[in-house]
Image: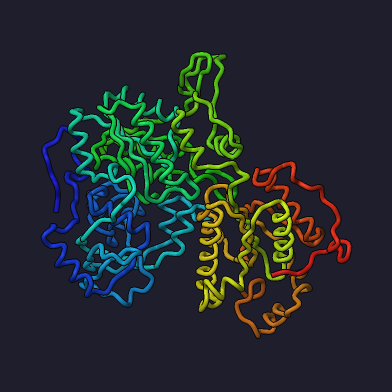
Amino acid sequence: MNSTQTTTLITPYGGALKDLLVPESEVERLTAHAGDLASIQINERTLCDLELLAVGAFSPVDRFMGKDDYFGVLNNMRLKDGTVFPIPITLTVADPSQFKVGQEIALRSAKNNRLAILTIEEIYERDPELEAQKVCGTLDAKHPFVSEMKRWGRFNLSGPLQVLEIPRHYDFPELRHTPKQVREMLEAMSNPNVVAFQTRNPMHRVHEELTKRAAEESGACLLLQPVVGITKPGDVDTYTRVRVYKALVDNYYDEVTTLLSLLPLAMRMAGPREALWHAIIRRNYGANHFIVGRDHAGPGVDSTGKPFYRATEARELVAEHEKEIGVKMLPFDEMVYLPEEDRYEQVTRVPAGAKIANISGTQVRDEFLAKGKQLPEWFTRKETAAVLRSAYPPRTEQGFTIWFTGLPSAGKSTIAEILTVMLNERGRQVTVLDGDVVRTHLSKGLGFSREDRDTNITRIGFVASEIARHGGAVVYAAVSPYAATRNQVRAMHPDGLFFEVFVDTPVAVCETRDVKGFYAKARSGEIKGFTGVDDPYEAPANPELTLPTANRTAEENARQIVKVLVEEGFLEADEARPARESVLASKSGKNGSGH
């Protein structure tokens, strides 16, 4: 069904908001009916997509896309009717044999709540490589969304949806609104012009300045709509960010012309296409202007260290389509502080010779929060600084994960054991995630197929990320041969807390250390799927550390890790010990074997 109303605001994209929620009078009956149907448990990303489909945020899209829409979006950024839409919205499954056209299935949450009924009209094969290349512009597994897509099912389901309920959010309920509700609140401001601002980071003075300027110069109201679904791995957590937004809006914005509303969007970090998608979504919430920053929705750098997208690429794509989508692109240029004039200015408008000041996001994290230093008031409001201080203790009190990877018998376990002792010596309580113990207690029943190995590694990665997130030190040493899976584990960690350590040992050396004879058994065919023989090992492209073992002892390598942890602030600098020969080194003069 569609929802229409007389409005001074721009109309929803496609003319009307799609409303997929069943009437309240039907909820009980259809929920009971859903309990009798075959069901699919959907993940967090699909849950976010379902919620925004249900309330019309993705209008005119009213379902998980069928084949024509899917390939039209990939190849031309258009639905089959020609409407511009840059991001595919899909429901993937691994095994299509359990479904048939005409069948009703229930969609349920991770907690098994019955959320919707889907009547299957299409079952079709997706094209993962085409999807990654077209949507993200790359096949590089360093891109978090590309890495995630590799684990999706190969087939898509599509058909009409009857949504029984949208997810219940117990955090900040006063800031969660449907497009219809946002439109009603904006209508009350009696201004047809609305500037929307998308953010997934804490807002500082520069963001405050640019949003106020954008609204003033456009003669518009301001819709601050931060994303609180899935953002870039390592981003500041939702609760901290929203506390910042609330403090700023309550104290420094005009409540008559400003609306703060949260958006439960699952970002793809797809740069230009994502920026265009964000603009379309904001039109459904009533905005006709959208601020686009440099490298909007970009995930950073690729495996070669280069940015995935050009800094202005997102702006260019939105500007190219702004007339067709009805949303004017407002560029967000870099702004700097002029200390002698106590004001912010766009970097392109700074007077010649003027003194400027700026603090990057990396400096905020590494030079201020990590060291317990107060952020200056010209950079951020005192309320923001207080929230960030409470959420981010000094680096010496933060956790981290040391993730050893390398061929079997490369020496990972030996270095890990020595490192653990060194960390304990420095007062760090270390959790060692032993591969055999984990397989016994966490991954019992899994074999050694690629799929089972990936499942085992991601389970370990999740445990490690939670320990690190809560201030613990984690050491894990196992082959973990596949780059995409290691990138997934990295993505689970807050930014800066994951150290991939590549133990770089030639296969020939590994074979000489293999006291259990696994390499020989693999070469004789007695063992199948052995990494380094008949199953590939994908060496890291950009690990935090590469440790050669052919000409360096295990202790020397362990001390190199300690040195990096000191440099990064996780260990006190005055606790660093000079390298010295150990009993182990004096006896053996070389690395021991490890797995």
Taking 198 as reference, is 431 above or below it? below
Residue drawn at x 53%, y 43% is: 307
Q: In the shown orientation, is residue 24 left or right of residue 74?
A: left
Query: What's the coloring here?
Result: rainbow
Taking 122 as reference, is 551 above or below it? above
What x and y, as percent, mark residue 153? 40, 67
Residue 446 versus residue 436: which sits nearer the camera? 436
Q: In the shown orientation, is residue 529 left or right of residue 49?
A: right
- Residue 518: image quadrant is bottom right
Q: How many marks?
A: 0
Q: Quadrant of the N terminus?
A: bottom left
Residue 352 versus residue 445: which sits nearer the camera? 445
Work out which residue is located at the far front of the displayed protein and give it.
427
Residue drawn at x 61%, y 58% is: 474
Work out which residue is located at the far right of the displayed protein and give it.
586
What x and y, as percent, mark residue 207? 42, 30
What x and y, as percent, mark residue 43? 37, 62
Q: In which quarter of the image is the C terminus?
A: bottom right
Residue 107 versus residue 392: which sits nearer the camera? 392
- Residue 479: image quadrant is bottom right
Residue drawn at x 41%, y 52% is: 134
Taking 385 as reference, is 270 above or below it? below
What x and y, as percent, mark residue 226? 36, 41
Q: In the shown orientation, is residue 263 left or right of residue 163?
A: right
